[in-house]
Amino acid sequence: MRPDSARLGSARLGRANLDRLPPAVRRPAYDRSRVTPGIVHLGLGAFHRAHQAVVIDDCLAAGEAGWGIIGASLRSPDTREALAPQDHLYTLAVRSAEGTEHRVIGALLDSVVARENPAALVERMSDPATRIVSLTVTEKGYCHTPQTGDLDERHPDIVHDLNTHPETPRSAPGFIVAALARRRARGLPPFTVLCCDNLAANGHTVQRIVTQFAALRSKDLCKWIADNVAFPSTMVDRIVPETTDADREAVANALGLRDAWPVMTEPFTQWVVEDRFPAGRPDLAAAGVELVADVKPFELMKLRLLNASHSALAYLGYLAGYETIADTMRDLHFARLAAQVMEDAAVTLTMPSGADLAAYRASLLKRFANPALRHRTWQIAMDGSQKLPQRLLGAMQDRLGKNLPIATHALAVAGWMRYVTATDEHGRAIDVRDPLAGEFAALAREAGPVAERLAPALLGVGRVFGPLGADPRLREAVTAALGSLYRDGARQAVQTHVSA
């Protein structure tokens, strides 16, 4: 949500008035004037500011002054317009049932809007001081096909970047390749590309997308990137709801100053990173990051336990009339559904010694039920076409491979299908935000509210379901679940399922 600057008043958070903050509010424990940039971050949204930027803030407080962040919004100027007048300082509000803790984060030194001046962003990424380019551009921001993990060469931004404007790109892959090409031409070492989005094997996936893009520009460039650029995989975990005007008012009351765009979050945070940084990195471990040789088990654990159950609650909870995840979890049948999604997915995971999946699942249920976080079901439901393969379909495929039932996951997928028809159970319009929303709406109009027609039509969208969509066991389970949603409504369908 874009902040309403007219309501914010003139007493704004900023470098000059940090000493006016109440003693209980933490502030940067270092001299920001001595901090220099070492990271360019693509995708300057709430999640980055509540997660990676907080870790870097801790690193700066430990004396590592060369790792400040330059943030880049690929499209909207809203974040820059909110934060620039307050010297890019912002508030992290950590909410739990016990209360809220406030902390001012100073790791973000500056921000740019890529669409306004793409050449300037490419130049910033080409600066020798930039040793890490990190990303939280959401799944759709990689301009790829989620089912295969390959670059979508037909994506309009990719067509733009390759055919007409390689030096002034629009896409995240385009910016990365343009900057790496410039560094290569100048004889500079490459930066590390650090993906912090929920993609399966995210480092490997982004490496494949970037090298495929580079190959379409130059085979020599592609080989140089493949041979020299590190793409460590990561797993990130923190719940970050959308900031509301009520949140801004609460933060202003706590600080005695206005913050145009604070971020809300929970106490829990986790960051697991494959330790491959040829160009250097801050001491992430000292700031609580888990540095490991293989992130994949942790990635799958999060995608298939947290993200999958989150999506199930989002689609089915929205259809049942629940505004937030915490509201949904107060319905014990939905809480049982979330637990069932995790239980069914757990058998598809192979975790390293010492990992406690039962404890992790219990912690997720507690986090989802946190009444202090207003994480909207509608927000989580965005971009489902990009999320389903990693969150739900992979576990379904693995369970089918073990001849195990998939009814619980099928109900979640059916909830997504019912949601993307763009009409709720009371005939009201749903604001579906998805790159393929138009295609889904057209299929829904043609099929009508008939599960036997709609389910096969949507399962036939190869960019989402791939070959799995043709599996008769999947088709039967999803069609039956969708039929129950049309017949009984989401609330009753969930109650019937978890009571069976």
Image (cartoon, rainbow, N blue to C red):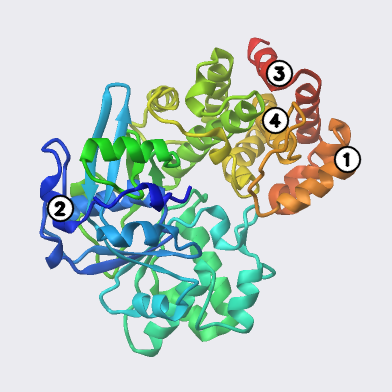
Judged by depth in the image, the label closer to the viewer, 2 or 1, is 2
Give the amino acid type for the residue marked by disc 2 in the picture. Asn
- Single out the mark in the foreground, 4 or 2: 2
Horizontal relation, residue 360 to residue 448: left or right: left
**Spatial distance from mark 2 to mark 1, Cα to Cα?**
59 Å
**Is the Cβ of the residue at disc 1 closer than 8 Å to that at disc 4?**
no
Give the labeled residue for mark 1.
447
Q: Position of residue 57 (x, y in %)?
A: 21, 52
**What amino acid is at disc 1?**
Ala
The residue that mark 2 highlights is 17
Give the crowd class for mark 2: few <14, some 14-19, many >=20 residues within 10 Å: few
Q: Crowding at label 1, few (<14), some or many (≥20) Cα neighbours within 10 Å?
A: some
Compared with 151, 128 (above or below) is below
Q: Amino acid at mark 3?
A: Ala
- Disc 4 target residue: 410
Q: Tell me the number on the disc at residue 82.
A: none
The local secondary structure at tag 2 comes to: helix
